[in-house]
C-alpha cells in the first residue's frame, strides 16, 4: 500500500500555512497558476519513510464560500480533485475564527487532520488547548505544531499518512435545527430527482443553496429542469424567514459559530485579560490619526535609503567592479588566444558589458524585495494600506492600491502581482492599469545617466539639481498614476462602490527563513526574466550594430542605425529626433535598463565617462528632461506587459495599456520640450 | 436600541445584531466573526475606516461597511 499520497493545505491567511508548506517541501516546490484564474498554485513534494507525498498549498481563505476566486479554487480542489487528506492549518491564538473554515471543510466530507499551528504564540498568551477534546469533538486527529521551528511536523505527517491510508470516512454533520434540516432534505430530494450527474455532493449543494452561494446557484442553473430546484429553493427560503425570523444564510453562519463556541468553551482555556496586547499598543501609533502618515513616510523613506545606498551604491558598485574585472580578464584571454576582433567585441562589449550594465541593479532589487518581505511578514503592510486608504478614497482608489504602487517602485511586475490582494474586480483592474506609471528601479539608470550629465552638481536653491530632478520624476509618475486612476474610476470602470474590509494580522517578528524564501521567490522570478530577455536583447543589439559586416560598430551605417533613422522623426517634437535616441527607446521596450546599455553601444562608449560625455554632446538639459519623462511614462517593459496580460486575463487590456502608455509617454516628452522652448530654454 | 457601528465610541463594546445588505461582502465579514451575537470592541473610530476587534481578529471596516453593521452597545 505504498501509493503516492496527495495532501492539500488549507487555512486562513496568516496562519503559518506557508511556513508549514516550506517545512514539508523544502526546495522541492513549484509555483504556478491555477488554470483560468489568477490565483497562485503552489505544489511540492517530500518523502517520508519511503512514501512519496505531494503537497498542494491552497490559497489562504476564511471560508469555502464563493466570495473570491481564491475560495472557489480551494473548494473545487477539495471537492473535485479529491486529495487524500486535507491538513487544516490553524492559528491557535485565534481559534474561534479559524475553526469556521474547519467547519466548512468538514462539511465537504474530506478526510482531515487539524494542525494547531503557532502554538508558541498561544502559549505566550497563556492559552491552554485540550487537544484530545477538540479531536473528539471534530472526530479528526489534531496535532500541535510550530511550523517556524519545525515542531510537531513529524507527528503531523504520521497522522496524515495514517488517515490517508485508512478507509475511514468523514461523517461530520452540523445540525442546523429542524427547520433548516427539513428544507435541506426537500431541496436535496429535488436535486436528485432532476439531475443525473452529481458534480457536488447533493446534501452539501443544498446547504450551499440555502446559504446563497453564487457558484452553486450558477451550477444549478445549468442543470436541465433547474426551475424545479429554484422553485423549491425560493419556497424554502420564504418558509425559513418566517420560521426563524431572519435570512437562512445569516442563520447558518450563526449556527456554525454556535457549535464552534461550544467546542472552544469545552476545550480551550484562556485568561480573559483586558491588558492591551503588544500589537494593539503598536497600532495606537501606526494607525494614529495624525502620526500614522508621518510614521509611514519615515518607514518608506528608510526603505528607499537602504535600497539605494546599500543595495545600489554599495552592493551594486561591487557588481559593477566585478563585471569590469571579468570583462578585462576574459578580454585578455581571448586576445592572447588570438581570437578574431569580432568575437572579442561580442564577448567583452556585447555580452559582458551589456549584461553588466543591467546586473548592476540586481542587488538593489534583492534589497528592495528583502525590505518588502520584512514589511509584509511583520504585518506592517496591512497598516500601510489602512493609512493610505483615506487619501486613496478621495481619489476614488482603494487603500491596498497604494501598497501596490509602493511595491511598483521596486519593480512594476511585483507591484502588478501584488494587486491580487484587492477584492473587487474594479479596484484590481484600475490598480493593474495605473501601476506602470510608477517609476521602477529599471528606469533609474536612465535618470542616473542624464541627471548625471546635466544636473548633478548644479543647485536649485540649496538642493542638488540632480536630486530634485530624479525626485520630481518619481512624483510625476505617481501623479500620472493617480490621475489615470481617477479617470478610470469615474469614466471607465463605473462599477459599484467597493467596501474597505481588511484583516490586520497581529504583528509578528518575521523569521529570517521566511523573509529569505519570500524575497527569493520574487527576485528569482525577476532574475530569470532578466537573464533571458535582456541577454537576448543585448545580443540582438550587438548583432544589429555590427552588421552589415565590416561596418564601424554602432554607427549610422549599421543595421541598428538604419532602424533608428526610420523611427527618429517620431521624436523630433520632443527634441531628440536622433536615431540613437530612437533605437535606445525601442530596446527599452524589452527592459528599461536596456535604454542605457543601448545608448552605450550606439555612442560607442566603453565606459561611464565617455557615455556621459557623448550624452552631453547629443542632448541639452531640456531635451534630456524630455527624454527622461518619456522613459518614465512610455510603454512598460515586456515583463510588465506580460504581467498585465496574466493578471487581467486578457490580451485586449495589455494592448490597451501599451497604447495609452506610449501615447502618454510621447505626449509627456513632447509637452516638456515644447513648453520648455516656449519658456525660452534650449 | 439598534444602531450602526459607526456610532459606538472608542474602547466600547458592542453586540452585533445583523449586517444589512446581503451582498457577498456582508456575508464575508459575518464569516470572519461579525455574526449575530458576537461581541466586538471598537479600537479606532476617529477618522477614516474603523478598526474593531472580534475575538482575536482585528478587522478594518470602511465607514460605508460599518454603517451596515447594526449593533447594540454593551
Image (tube, grey):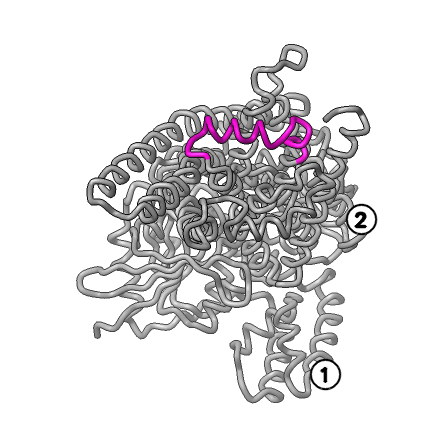
Evaluate if marks 2 and 1 touch, with contact meaning CB atoms under 8 Å apart: no
Residue appearing at x 25%, y 53% in the figure: A155
Residue A313: in magenta span:
no
Residue A8 shown left or right of residue A458 in the figure? left
Q: In the current view of this chain or complex, which residue is farthest to the top? A: A462
How many numbered marks, from 0 up?
2
Which residue is labeled 2 in the image?
A: A490
Specify the quadrant that holds the N terminus of chain A: bottom left
Residue A608: in magenta span:
yes
Label 1 element class: helix
Instruction: Name the residue nearer the viewer: A153 or A307.
Output: A307
Residue A258 shows in this picture:
no
State the extent of the magenta-drawn residues as a range. A605-626
Specify the quadrant that holds the C terminus of chain A: top right
Residue B22 shows in this picture:
yes
**Crowd around label 2: few <14 · some 14–19 · many ≥20 (10 Å):** few
Label 2 element class: helix
Q: Is residue A681 above or below residue A148?
A: above
Give the distance between the C-alpha atoms of the residues marked 2 and 1, in whole angstroms.
Answer: 39 Å
Amino acid at each position: 500500500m505504498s501509493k503516492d499520497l496527495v495532501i492539500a493545505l488549507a487555512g486562513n491567511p496568516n496562519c503559518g500555512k506557508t511556513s508549514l508548506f516550506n517545512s514539508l517541501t523544502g526546495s522541492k516546490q513549484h509555483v504556478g497558476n491555477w488554470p483560468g484564474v489568477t490565483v497562485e498554485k503552489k505544489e511540492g513534494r517530500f518523502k517520508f519513510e519511503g512514501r512519496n507525498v505531494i503537497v498542494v498549498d491552497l490559497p489562504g481563505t476564511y471560508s469555502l464560500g464563493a466570495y473570491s476566486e481564491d475560495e472557489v479554487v480551494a473548494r473545487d480542489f477539495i471537492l473535485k480533485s479529491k486529495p487524500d487528506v486535507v491538513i487544516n492549518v490553524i492559528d491557535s491564538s485565534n481559534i474561534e475564527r479559524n475553526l469556521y473554515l474547519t467547519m466548512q471543510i468538514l462539511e465537504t466530507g474530506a478526510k482531515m487532520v487539524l494542525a494547531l499551528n503557532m502554538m508558541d504564540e498561544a502559549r505566550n498568551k497563556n492559552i491552554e488547548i485540550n487537544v484530545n477534546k477538540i479531536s473528539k469533538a471534530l472526530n479528526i486527529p489534531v496535532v500541535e505544531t510550530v511550523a517556524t521551528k519545525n515542531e510537531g511536523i513529524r507527528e503531523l505527517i504520521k497522522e496524515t499518512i495514517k488517515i490517508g491510508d485508512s478507509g475511514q470516512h468523514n461523517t461530520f454533520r452540523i445540525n442546523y435545527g429542524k427547520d433548516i434540516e427539513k428544507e435541506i432534505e426537500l431541496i436535496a430530494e429535488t436535486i436528485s430527482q432532476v439531475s443525473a450527474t452529481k458534480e457536488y455532493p447533493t446534501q452539501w449543494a443544498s446547504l450551499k443553496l440555502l446559504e446563497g452561494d453564487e457558484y452553486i446557484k450558477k451550477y444549478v442553473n445549468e442543470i436541465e429542469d433547474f426551475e424545479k430546484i429554484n422553485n423549491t429553493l425560493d419556497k424554502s427560503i420564504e418558509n425559513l424567514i418566517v420560521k426563524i425570523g431572519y435570512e437562512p444564510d445569516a442563520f447558518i453562519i450563526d449556527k456554525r459559530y454556535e457549535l464552534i463556541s461550544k467546542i472552544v468553551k469545552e476545550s480551550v482555556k484562556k485568561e480573559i485579560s483586558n491588558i492591551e496586547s503588544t500589537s494593539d499598543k503598536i497600532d495606537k501609533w501606526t494607525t494614529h490619526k495624525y502620526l500614522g502618515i508621518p510614521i509611514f513616510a519615515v518607514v518608506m523613506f528608510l526603505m528607499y535609503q537602504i535600497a539605494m545606498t546599500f543595495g545600489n551604491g554599495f552592493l551594486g558598485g561591487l557588481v559593477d567592479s566585478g563585471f569590469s574585472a571579468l570583462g578585462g580578464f576574459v578580454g585578455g584571454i581571448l586576445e592572447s588566444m588570438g581570437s578574431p576582433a569580432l568575437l572579442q567585441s561580442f564577448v567583452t562589449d556585447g555580452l559582458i558589458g551589456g549584461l553588466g550594465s543591467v546586473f548592476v541593479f540586481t542587488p538593489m532589487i534583492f534589497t528592495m524585495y528583502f525590505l518588502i518581505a520584512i514589511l509584509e511578514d511583520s504585518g506592517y503592510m496591512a497598516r500601510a494600506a489602512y493609512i493610505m486608504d483615506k487619501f486613496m478614497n478621495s481619489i476614488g482608489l482603494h487603500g491596498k492600491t497604494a501598497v501596490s504602487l509602493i511595491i511598483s517602485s521596486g519593480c512594476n511586475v511585483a507591484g502588478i502581482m501584488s494587486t491580487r490582494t484587492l477584492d473587487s474586480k474594479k479596484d484590481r483592474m484600475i490598480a493593474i492599469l495605473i501601476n506602470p506609471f510608477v517609476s521602477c528601479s529599471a528606469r533609474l539608470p536612465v535618470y542616473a545617466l542624464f541627471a548625471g550629465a546635466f544636473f548633478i552638481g548644479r543647485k536649485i536653491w540649496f538642493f542638488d539639481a540632480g536630486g530634485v530632478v530624479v525626485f520630481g520624476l518619481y512624483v510625476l509618475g505617481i501623479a500620472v498614476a493617480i490621475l489615470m486612476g481617477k479617470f478610470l474610476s469615474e469614466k471607465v470602470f463605473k462599477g459599484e462602490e467597493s467596501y474597505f474590509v481588511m484583516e490586520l494580522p497581529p504583528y509578528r517578528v518575521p523569521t529570517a527563513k521566511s523573509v529569505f524564501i519570500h524575497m527569493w521567490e520574487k527576485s528569482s522570478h525577476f532574475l530569470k526574466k532578466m537573464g533571458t530577455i535582456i541577454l537576448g536583447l543585448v545580443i540582438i543589439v550587438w548583432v544589429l550594430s555590427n552588421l552589415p559586416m565590416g561596418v564601424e560598430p554602432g554607427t549610422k551605417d549599421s543595421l541598428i542605425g538604419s532602424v533608428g533613422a526610420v523611427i527618429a522623426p517620431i521624436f523630433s517634437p520632443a527634441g531628440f529626433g536622433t536615431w540613437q535616441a530612437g533605437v535606445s527607446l525601442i530596446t527599452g521596450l524589452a527592459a528599461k535598463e536596456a535604454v542605457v546599455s543601448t545608448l552605450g553601444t550606439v555612442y560607442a562608449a566603453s565606459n561611464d565617462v565617455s557615455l556621459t560625455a557623448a550624452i552631453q554632446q547629443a542632448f541639452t538639459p531640456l531635451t534630456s528632461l524630455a527624454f527622461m519623462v518619456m522613459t518614465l511614462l512610455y510603454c512598460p517593459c515586456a515583463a510588465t506587459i506580460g504581467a498585465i496580460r496574466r493578471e487581467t486575463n486578457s490580451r485586449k487590456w495589455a494592448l490597451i495599456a501599451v497604447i495609452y502608455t506610449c501615447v502618454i509617454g510621447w505626449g509627456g516628452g513632447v509637452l516638456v520640450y515644447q513648453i520648455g522652448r516656449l519658456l525660452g530654454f534650449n | 436600541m439598534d444602531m450602526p457601528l459607526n456610532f459606538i465610541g472608542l474602547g466600547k463594546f458592542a453586540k452585533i445584531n445583523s449586517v444589512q445588505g446581503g451582498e457577498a461582502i456582508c456575508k464575508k465579514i459575518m464569516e470572519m466573526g461579525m455574526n449575530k451575537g458576537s461581541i466586538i470592541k471598537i479600537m479606532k473610530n476617529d477618522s477614516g475606516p474603523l478598526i474593531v476587534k472580534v475575538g482575536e481578529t482585528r478587522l478594518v471596516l470602511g465607514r460605508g461597511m460599518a454603517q451596515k453593521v447594526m449593533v447594540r452597545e454593551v
